[in-house]
Amino acid sequence: MAIGWVRAYSDEFIHFKDIVGESKKDKSFYRQGFRTKIHELQDENSPVLQELKWEDEVELPDGIGSGSFTKVIFQGNEGFVKRSHLVEVGFVHNLEEGEDNRFIAQLETNVRTIKLLWGDLVQIRKREGDKCKVKARNWFGTMDTNRIIDKALLDIFFIDVGQGDGILVRFPEGKHLLIDGGLQRKNQMTGKNAADFLDWKFHADYGHFKITLDGMMASHCDSDHYGGLWDLVKEPIAEDKELDCVELKIKEFFHAGLSRWKKRENLANPHKDGLGPTSDGWFVRLLGDRTDVEESVEENSENTLQGDWGSFIKAVLDQDADTTIERVGVKEEEIKNGTDFPQIWKNDSECAIKVLAPITRQVNGIDALKDLGVKSINTNGHSICLRLDYGSARILLTGDLNSASMNWISEVFEDRINEFSCDAAKACHHGSHDISYKFLKEINAAATVICSGDSEGYAHPRPEIVAASAVTGFVAVDEVKDKLITPLIYMTEIERSVSLGRLTHIRLKNFPDIANTVKEEVVFATSPDLISNSALYSYRERKIMDDMDDTNEKEDFKDEIEEREKDLLESSFEKQVNAETEADFHYQTVHKFTTPYGNQRLKGTRIMTKNHYGLVTVRTDGETMMCATMTETGDGWSTKSFPARFVN
């Protein structure tokens, strides 16, 4: 039976149509307060059986249809809801093997053709024979009915967070797991991290006002992994000006156990490197469940979390009293005994989420983690490592495993080390050189995704590791076409690009001069005769024109602006030439460790007009693996596919 969501996009458009300056946050508040009704009959005057909220999910026995009302089932009530208040949930279907662009579907909008990707979520607003009116990727348009099915894929988004990791997994049944988030925004080159991508996914793509995560995971306690998660939870989301959603629900929080603790004197077990007490080469104080975490943030506890990690964990606690907290790992004895691996959401997901690391050993009756060496080796090496099994497909998510932890894992797994073999893998530790070549051979991935960043001081990925990921990968060749199918190597850093623009002028309004009067002014980066008419409109004026339906009205509006702005440019430029006016801009470089400052002349300066994120997505139906990246122009996809090879 088809699934539907309450989504009243037409009402929302009408509500905001004549409101200038509305924000996406305003839309979230509108959605939050929206209500519709289930009627007994296809008549607004018939008895009301139940009220529905924007976020509600309903069953659609006959699909969305094309009439004024749609039949729904919700909490045992069967009745009718306005079709304009509902969407039917579907997903982009692929074409048969061998057909051109088999993983790409076209969405025709009033503006341009949007390329949708196999597995993209599609909200069907109306079915009309072989065509559907839909919303997808925040675009409204029409697409072929035969390119939409009701079956979702296993979908893994490797988010470009610069330095660090950020992974969003959407499971076929609709669960969402966010693993890591990159550095905090303030330390990111782009000013964005996984929190922002997640917000786009739920607000723009899904059309929601609330982010709902079935699970949020910090693979380990380094800031380039939990920083973006911290941005998500450190303040009420309704007050976060960076995000558009106004509600956040995190059902479960997962962590690796090894944490950063305040050093305590005169304890039975000595502390090491701020990672807590040790005993005979083992870390014996691992963070546990919610009760333990609540105790661990208290100053008077025997062991208290410290620094940014402690503040982040405290924010997770404060965000929602109902969020459960769980340490993730696998016991050494279970691996050696051939026991099944622990699973997250066992029997509650179509995909098996198996835990392969970190490995604990019982020391004095408690779970402990091996001391692998220096501090960074321990925090990275004891990352959570997951294997996602779906049909014949395996995807390995490795955190920041290093050679020390790989050697320890190999020692414990022995002849079970082939459990790390997979179709697609997230490369360990951003392409660091500190990797075991033998371990990569066991992974034998057909596709590897390296999450790396720019100007962060680590020079990741290292060339020898890019090469090693290739030569240890699973080799498949199309002998007929003389083409290599796999291995494939992706890097979020390579996939990222920016669009640059030539700065023309800076327009100041309501700028007080020395006499305290209010005036308008322009600061030039080039001569006015090089400034085109299209550069004369403000952001607000462009938005007004976009909403104008009358062509003559739009042209009159444009003429008025151009005449006004050209007069201002000419008078301002003449004054500044006579006064020999100069302008510099001053900046602070965004960097994790240092914050160098500089300045530069305004004239001739280029500015970044758009950041094209280096998103890599891996999708599978359990039989076919597809890897995709967005093209440089942002209007299409580059896709590669190969068969999944692990038959369970």
Image: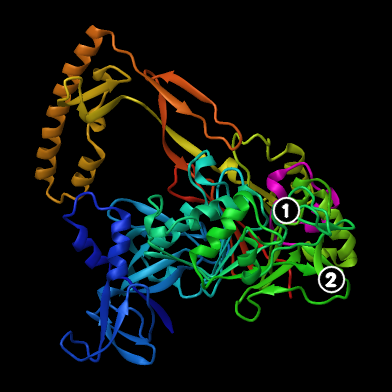
Residue 276 in the image: above or below residue 643: above
Q: Nearer the viewer, residue 528 or 197?
A: 197
Q: Position of residue 62 (x, y in %)?
A: 35, 85
Mark 2–mark 1 Cα distance, whole angstroms, equals 40 Å
Residue 394 in the image: above or below residue 590: below
Q: Position of residue 236 (x, y in %)?
A: 42, 59
Stretch of the chain drawn in magenta? 421-446
Answer whether residue 147 is magenta in the image.
Answer: no
Res 340 quadrant in image: bottom right
Residue displayed at 33% across by 72% down = 54
Answer whether residue 423 is magenta in the image.
Answer: yes
Residue displayed at 69% across by 40% down = 461
Tag 1: Cα neighbours inside 10 Å, few (<14), some, or many (≥20)? few
**Which of the numbered marks, if any, corresponds to residue 479?**
1
Q: Position of residue 186 (x, y in %)?
A: 50, 42
Q: Secondary structure at mark 2?
A: helix
Res 134 quadrant in image: bottom left
- In the picture of the structure, the residue carrying the numbered disc 2 is 335
Q: Position of residue 414 (x, y in %)?
A: 90, 64
Q: Nearer the viewer, residue 176 or 535?
A: 176
